[in-house]
Image (cartoon, grey):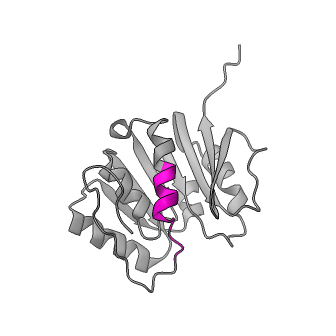
Amino acid sequence: MRIIAGKYRSRRIAPPKNLPVRPTTDRARESLFNILNNLVEFEEIKALDLFSGTGAVSFELISRGCRQVTAVDHNKQCTTWIKKAARDFQMDDIRVVPADVFRFMNHRGEKYDLIFADPPYSLENLPEISRYVFENKLLNENGWLVVEHPREIDFSGQPYFHSHRKYGKVNFSFFHFVEHDTE
């Protein structure tokens, strides 16, 4: 794996082989960030990386200029690896939180401009991720949620759903939080 663009472009990400993760491929991540380039100004946003695994998305966000990224994963090996890699890369704007993602979302008062979630595909409550994000008001106005998921899951009927993209076996559903006028 490598960082695709930005300040840390081409830096290799070499996590330990024993991490219990299914990292987003470089190709799918590159496609995702090509879309995000048209949706957000990286230098102006605060991002949340849920189920952060290897930290590849967090590192990519920092490399592209995000002012702050919070990486959350319940696996201690993953969070230890992300902290070490962030130190090695001298990425001071990554905050690593070892926690259950759903508990983290339930007890957060902080808001983000971009949330990326890459849960294990076998996660029972994977379809509820968007509900947790919106019920807990984790996005700022005009914020984006991106969920990576298996093809069997269809988010299109959920509130704030914007679009779906498929890259090989990788599926991304995009949600755009815009308050609707009540007048």
Above or below: residue 62 compared with residue 76: above
Indicate the quadrant where residue 55 lies. Answer: bottom left
Number of numbered tags placed on the structure image: 0
Position of residue 11 in the picture relative to residue 101 (left or right) = left
Nearest to the observer: residue 71 or residue 107:
71
Relative image position of residue 162 (x, y in whole percent)? 66, 38
Q: Which residues are magenta?
A: 21-32
Image quadrant in which the N terminus is located: bottom left
Which residue occupies the extreme top position in the image?
A: 183
**Residue 98 appears in view:** yes
Relative image position of residue 119 (x, y in whole percent)? 59, 65
Residue 105 included in the magenta stretch of the image: no
Above or below: residue 38 compared with residue 30: above
Above or below: residue 44 compared with residue 170: above
Relative image position of residue 35 (x, y in whole percent)? 51, 43
Residue at 38% x, 82% y is 16
Relative image position of residue 110 (x, y in whole percent)? 46, 45
Position of residue 70 in the picture relative to residue 145 (left or right) = left
Position of residue 63 in the picture relative to residue 17 (left or right) = left
Nearest to the observer: residue 1 or residue 175:
1
Residue at 44% x, 40% y is 37
Image quadrant in which the C terminus is located: top right
Above or below: residue 134 compared with residue 118: above
Residue at 48% x, 68% y is 73
Residue at 72% x, 40% y is 159
**Residue 113 appears in view:** no
Indicate the quadrant where residue 150 lies. Answer: bottom right
